Image: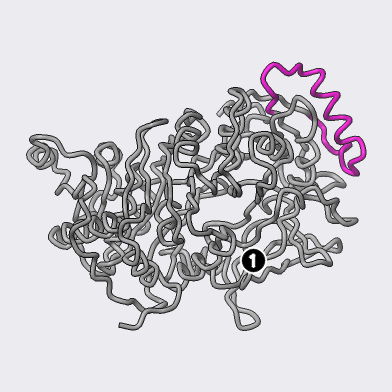
Amino acid sequence: MTVAPGSVFTRLARLTEHPRATVLVRCAGALRTEDVTAAQLLDGCRRTADALRAAGVRRGDKAVVMTRDAYRLVASVYALVSLGAVPVLIEPRAEVRRCLDEIAPDVFIGDPLAHVARRALGWGRGRVRTTLVTGRAFPGRARLLGLLGWGESLPSAVPDGGGPAPDVPEPRPDDLAMIAFTSGSTGQPKGVEYRHATLAGQLATLDAVLRAEPGDVLLSCFLPFAALGPLLGVTTVAPQVDHLAPARTPPGHLVGPLLGHRATLVLGSPAVLALIAGHCVRHGLTLPSVRRVLSFGAPLRPRLVEMLAKVLPPGAEILSVYGATECLPVAAIDADALRVEPPPGHAGTCLGRPLPGVRARVLDADGTGLGEIAVAGPVVSPAYHARPDATDAAKSFADGALWHRTGDLGRLDDDGRLWYLGRTAHLVTGAGFTLTTEDVEAAADTAPGVRRTALVGVGPAGRQRAVLCVEPERGARQEAVVDALRAALGGHPHARSIGTVLFRPRFPTDIRHNSKIDRARLAAYAEGGRR
C-alpha cells in the first residue's frame, strides 16, 4: 500500500524497524515503572483492535477513551485508528454529559472509575451502544463486569510482543481521525476535529519543536501527549500525574521517573514545571540529563525560568510553546528571547515567530496593531464537531488557506514575531481606558512576593472597574506586596486605571493544565460572589 509521508501510518510502520526499543514507560508513583517495547506496543494494539472488533466496533464509530493509564490509552487510541474508528479525548469534568450529548458517541472505553461516573452522571445515556472496560484483571472480573452492565474487558496486561503488528489500512487525508475537546477554560468545551492530514501536519511541526535525537527520552507530563510520543520516534515516559488537578501531583512522581530514566526532554505546563523545579530546589537536586524543556498551556514567566535554570545543566534550552487545541503548535521561543524588550506600542509577551509551514496574521487590528491572532497551516483543524455555528465563527478561507481565529489578542512586530496580549474575551474596558490582561500581568508578576496576578473587569463592558487579583507567595505580607506592585507598575501607562487590588490565596484554574486562570470566577469573586 502507499502511505502518505509523515502520516500516522508511516510512523506506526517505523516502530517495527526497532522492535526491542523501548517506546513507552508507564509509571506508578516515584519509582515503579514498566518499559514497553515497540513490539509489545504494536502487539498490544493488535490485541486491543481484535477485542474492539469482536465487541462490534466498526469503521467510523466515535469512541470516547477515558483512562488514566498511559499504555491503555495509547493501545486503545492506536487500535481504534487502525479500525478506522474515531477516538474522542475528553477530560472527566462536569460538562462531560453535555459534550457527549453533542457528539453522540457509539462507544465508551474507560477504566472502572470512569464507568462509575458514566452510570452515576448519565454520560452518553441513550447514545452509547458499546461499553468496554480497561484496568487490571483479577479473578471474577468478567462476571463482575457483566453484573454491573459495564460491557467487555479490554486486554489489560502488556503482551510479550511475540504477536504481529496491527494491520493498518491507509485512510484518505481528509478522513476524520480524532476528536479532542478544548479545555473549556474560556467557554464551553468544543470537540475539535482532527483529520489525518491535520495529525500529519501537527506531528511534522512537533518534530521541528522537539528536535529529538537518537537516544532521547521524553518526560511527558500531559497524558494525551503520550499517545504522540512513540509516533515522534522518542522514548516517552508518562509519569503518574493527577489528571484532575495536575498542580497537586506529588513532585516525586515527576522527578523520580525523570531522574530514573535520565530524561533529556521535558514537556509540561508551567504549573507542573514549577512542581519539578521547586522540588529540586528544596532538596538540592539537579537534572543533569535534561537538555530541553518545553512549556505549554500558559505564558512562561521569568521567575519560573530562573527556577528551572537553577536545576538544569549549563546550555539547557527552555522553550515556551504557543498553540491551542485547534492549532498546535503555532510558535515557540527560547526563554532567553523572552527577555527582549517589546517595541514601542507592543507590550505583552513575545511568542516568537511562527513555526515552519505555519502562518499568522492579526485580524481587526486597531490603530496600534492590536487585534485577534489568526493561524493557517497544516496544524489547523478544519472544524468543530457538530458545532457549525462555532466553525463558521472561527474558520474562514483566505489567500488559498483555511484560517483559524484563536480568540487571542496580539500583534505582529516588524521582525515577524507574535506578541500575546491575552484573550479577546478578557479585555477590560472602562471609562476612558482599555486594558489587556497580558500587558498588565506580565509586569505585575515580576513584583516580589507575587506568585501570579489576574486582571479582571467588574461590571458591563465599557463601564468596567479594573481589578487586579493577586495570588501571593506563601508568607508574603500584603502591605509589602502592594508596595512591590506599585513599583512594578509605576511606569505602566495604564496602571492608574486599576482601581482595586484583591488578594486571594489560590486562583481557580483550568482542569487540564492548572495554568490558565478562570477569570470569570475571579470576576464574580471580585463582585462579592464566593463561587
Q: Provide the residue span drawn in magenta.
A: 471-500
- Tell me, yes or no, whether the highlighted magenta stretch contains residue 39: no
Q: Secondary structure at mark 1?
A: loop
- Residue 199 in the image, given as x and y percentages of width and height: 45, 67
Left or right: residue 258 versus residue 331 is left
Pick the front one: 382 or 377: 377
- Tell me, yes or no, whether the highlighted magenta stretch contains residue 475: yes
- Residue 506 in the image, given as x and y percentages of width and height: 61, 27
Q: Which residue is mark 1?
A: 355
Pick the front one: 157 or 233: 233
- Residue 448 in the image, given as x and y percentages of width and height: 79, 27
Pick the front one: 384 or 81: 81
Using the image, determine if residue 67 lies above or below residue 252.
Answer: below
Judge whether residue 415 can be spotted in this image.
yes
Residue in view at x 86 percent, y 24 percent: 483
Pointer 1: residues within 10 angstroms few (<14), some, or many (20+)? some
Residue in view at x 69 percent, y 43 percent: 314
Judge whether residue 127 can be spotted in this image.
no
